[in-house]
Amino acid sequence: MTIETLILYGAIAGLIAGLFIRGNGLGCLALIAVPAAIIAFVAIWHTAHPEVLESTSGLDYVFLPLWPTLGALGGFIVAKVVRGVMKRKR
């Protein structure tokens, strides 16, 4: 996966969370699922492909969740802005 793909998937997850979850606290809590899912994905991928592991593969657990989390925060903020505009128009 490329960085752009991870940001896009995170933004989609954040957009969905922001549109369907009303409270900011509960929405931010739901965004914790994004880095948790990426960490689980990395663990499964490392287990399934031990032949390609290198000495720096452990850094995947640290740096790979960064990009979808940033995308999810951006998508969440965009969704909140859209909800605010739609609410104001009513």
Image (cartoon, rainbow, N blue to C red):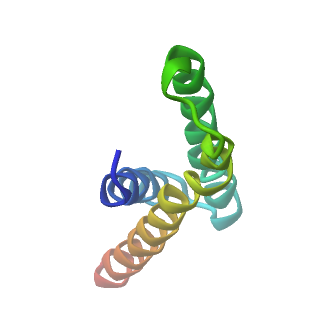
Return the residue nearer the eye: 87 or 7.
7
Q: Quadrant of residue 42?
A: top right
Q: Position of residue 67 (x, y in %)?
A: 49, 61
Return the residue nearer the eye: 47 or 19.
47
- Above or below 27: residue 45: above
Name of the residue lying farthest toward the top: 48
Q: At 65% from the left edge and 41% from the top edge, which residue is drawn?
A: 55
Q: Position of residue 90 (x, y in %)?
A: 31, 77
Q: At 68% from the left edge and 55% from the top edge, which residue is drawn?
A: 26
User: Where's the N terminus, which quadrant?
Assistant: top left
Judge from the rendering whether residue 1 lies leftward or rightward of residue 13; answer left or right.
left
Q: At 52% from the left edge and 25% from the top edge, which residue is drawn?
A: 45
Q: Position of residue 23 (x, y in %)?
A: 63, 62
Q: Position of residue 3 (x, y in %)?
A: 38, 58
Total number of numbered labels? 0
- Above or below 26: residue 51: above
Return the residue nearer the eye: 16 or 74.
74
Q: At 37% from the left edge and 50% from the top edge, which residue is drawn?
A: 9
Return the residue nearer the eye: 15 or 11.
11
Q: Quadrant of residue 88?
A: bottom left
